Image (cartoon, rainbow, N blue to C red):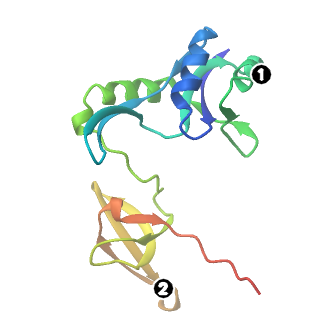
Amino acid sequence: MNKWYAIYTRPRHEKKVYDQLIEKKQVAYLPVISRVRLWKDRKKKVEMPLFPSYIFVNFDYKYRFDILQTHGVVKIVNFKGEPATVPDWQIEALKTMLEHPETLRTENYIKPGETVEVTEGPFKGMRGMVKTVKGDTRLIVTIDGIMQSVSVEIDAHFTKRFTEPSDKK
């Protein structure tokens, strides 16, 4: 049964991998967006992958070795040992969104409830959890000692996933 799978490629090999898969008669999708790149002497509009190092391929998983043997493919993305399938509706949503690139922007993938650190703005350096309330992104700071929490509205672009520094003793 054919499903969409996310394929991880070597850096800057997305277009080469895509072309090779199409030559192999595979159904592949590489979402790209036009961006203006600046060099010292010129500006040029270039097509860049929306998700660097990722492409999507629709195939039957039992035939995965043909995909994996494609030059530039690193692996089929998986979580906890299971291949990550992408629902058809998400691929279709991507295609529809890319028809209107002027309104498109990539977002940090941060789940509500995940601990983040604010990287810019008046709350820079603060850590807390993310919550969406009526379409607004809120940073929640919990004071565990008194079991109380406060929140402020933040721009989700100004956050990054927070990972505790490891002790090196």
Q: Is residue 56 above or below residue 108?
A: above
At label 2, counting other C-alpha atoms closer than 10 Å, the crowd grade (few under 14, some 14-19, many 20 or more) is few
* Tag 2 residue: 147
Q: What residue lies at 35% left-to-right and 59% top-to-bottom?
A: 132
Q: As rendered, which of 164 and 17 lies closer to the eye?
A: 17
On the picture, is 10 further left or further right than 35?
right
Task: Where is residue 125? Give x, y as percent.
Answer: 40, 79
Q: Is residue 121 above or below residue 55?
A: below
Mark sitting on residue 84: none
At label 1, counting other C-alpha atoms closer than 10 Å, the crowd grade (few under 14, some 14-19, many 20 or more) is few
Q: As rendered, which of 77 and 145 lies closer to the eye?
A: 77
Task: Where is residue 150? Give x, y as percent.
Answer: 35, 79
Q: As rendered, which of 116 and 138 lies closer to the eye?
A: 116
* Tag 1 residue: 65
Q: What residue lies at 45% left-to-right and 30% top-to-bottom?
A: 90
Task: Where is residue 15? Give x, y as percent.
Answer: 51, 26
Q: Quadrant of residue 164?
A: bottom right
Q: Quadrant of residue 53?
A: top right
The label nearer to you, 2 versus 1, is: 1
Measured Cα–Cα span from mark 2 to mark 1: 52 Å
Q: Secondary structure at mark 1?
A: helix
Amino acid bearing label 2: Met
What residue occupies the far left of the structure in this picture? 102
